[in-house]
Image: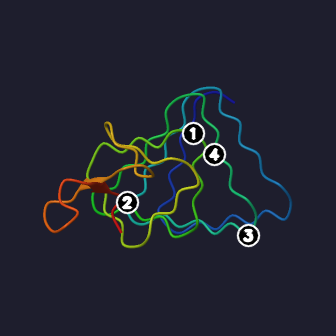
Amino acid sequence: AGNDFVTITGDVVVNITGNAYMNVTGNSTSTVGGNLNATITGTSDVTSEGKITITGNDTTEIISDTTVTGTLHVTGAQTNDSTIVASDTITDSGATLATHTHTISSGSSAGNTEQPD
């Protein structure tokens, strides 16, 4: 078939008792005027040869243990409501937390350095 348009003015339910495949040789766009919900009982995989962008105008929330394989680059503020655990060295723009020391400013050890508690 050539170009075609389908307009449905009521609800539509599509039941497929087998697999479903959609192959699009151009772009694909979905516009939803309300909420979008997907229930997946198996694994979800998203693969892109380009950038993947998720934009939320409010809060974007991930409710799960999350593993990032690669570099996590945070450009905004970061708030941690729990402990940060690292299995390797943590550094900032010059200090390494494992060997970072403070200078003692008073008492009998004034002038010496020690690692913070």
Please tell me which of labels 4 and 2 falls first in the chain.
Answer: 2
Occupied quadrant, residue 73: top left
For the residues marked 1 and 4, what is the alpha-carbon distance in whole angstroms? 16 Å
Which residue is depicted at the point 86% across and 60% down? 18
Residue that label 2 marks? 33
Which residue is denoted by mark 1 in the rendering?
Answer: 70
> Which residue is at the front of the view, 68 or 26?
68
* Callout 4 amino acid: Val
Q: Earlier in the sequence, mark 1 or mark 3?
A: 3
Q: Residue tagged by mark 4?
A: 46
Q: Quadrant of residue 108?
A: bottom left
Per the image, label 1 sits on a secondary structure element best described as loop
| Residue underneath mark 3 | 41
Mark whose residue sits in front, 1 or 4: 1
Q: Mark 3 against mark 2, which lies toward the viewer? A: 3
Secondary structure state at the residue bearing disc 3: loop
As measured in the structure, the alpha-carbon distance from the residue carrying label 2 to the one carrying label 1 is 35 Å
Is residue 44 left or right of 4 when viewed as pictured?
right
